[in-house]
Amino acid sequence: MKTKKLTTITGLACSVALGAATLAGAQEYPDRPIEMIVTFGPGGGADLMGRTASQLLEPRLGVPLPVSNVAGASGNAGLTQLRTNPADGYSMATLISLTVASWASGLGDNAPEDFDVVAVVQSSPSFLFVPANGPHQTAEALFEEARANPGTLTVATSGYGTQDDVTLKLLGEAEILMENVPFQAPAERYASPIGGHTSAIYEEPGDVAQFVRAGQLVPVVVFDTERHPEFPDVPTSAELGVEISGLDNFRTLSVKAGTDPEMVARLEEAIVDMVASPEWQEFCSQTYSCIEPVTGDEAQQMIVDFRETIAARLGS
């Protein structure tokens, strides 16, 4: 009887010790560097966001967050790397709407359920920008030319199957036919209209802010239902008779699906604190992308809904 009682007490003590060790392990996370996989090349908006987040999260998590640029396939190459890494909380990636749109177009084999979205940290509607020295300085002039001479105008985009591509297809349905010219490297895309290689560029304002401020690019239309507060003179596509909205460019920080919820919660806490910081607020203000962070089920649902929105627009 005494032996049985001792065994029960010993078992209880082991359970308590195991529970304490598990709790201690959770409290110690992270205890080594967390890789930040940026799913696009250097110089673009995703790269700038990932690097800024890496710098600001380091003091909040107490470990380095080295950045790895894994570009290709509209962001799917980097996400495939994240998906093949262990779900141990030590890999995080930029997962953005452009990549989600590519899934609806059949690019890659990634899906919303492969990832846990920790937080949506940026969002902005997209615009068409034209070179300041170009012949078409308004959307009306640009669209008139596209209708009169289908396919002669070219638009620099981030790729096929993205919301860039979807928007051009929707414009084409309104007989505004412009040729999609995809660029893998962000810097080459930004330089293309300025150098006269393309007629316009489809982009969010934050990614080309330096060229807008320098007077090299001019915004002519925003694809939204309301005018952008920072560009009040730029008409919406709806005002021009083309209903295109709901294709905003949002960016998230995500981990592999199946990551320990306590680890996800620790990352979420750090990211929410980062977004509230003066440093992040200055950054997002400069890139016209400030939002209240979206987390949890709502964040996860955003990528599901966006994929369905693009699929519906494509009729797939």
Image (cartoon, grey):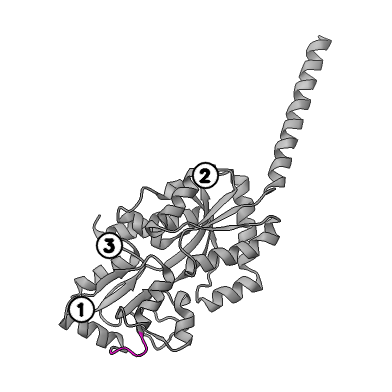
Distance (Cα) linking label 2 and label 3: 33 Å
Specify whether residue 119 is painted magenta: no
Residue 56, image x, y percentages? 64, 65
Q: Nearer the viewer, residue 156 or 308?
A: 156
> In screen coordinates, is 281 left or right of 114?
right
Mark before the other along the chain sequence, 1 or 3: 1
Q: Nearer the viewer, residue 296 or 181?
A: 181
- Residue name at image x 23 percent, y 58 percent: 315
86 over 186 or under it: above or below: above
Of the residues shown, which amino acid type is indicated by label 1? Thr
Q: Which residue is mark 3?
A: 313
Q: For the residue labelled by badge 1, is the local secondary structure a helix, a strand or a loop?
A: loop
Distance (Cα) linking label 1 and label 3: 24 Å
Residue sitting farthest toward the top:
1
From which residue to which does the magenta span run? 131-135
Specify whether residue 132 is painted magenta: yes
Q: Which residue is mark 1?
A: 152
The disc label shown at residue 85, or none: 2
Residue 237, image x, y percentages? 31, 78
- Residue name at image x 76 percent, y 25 percent: 12
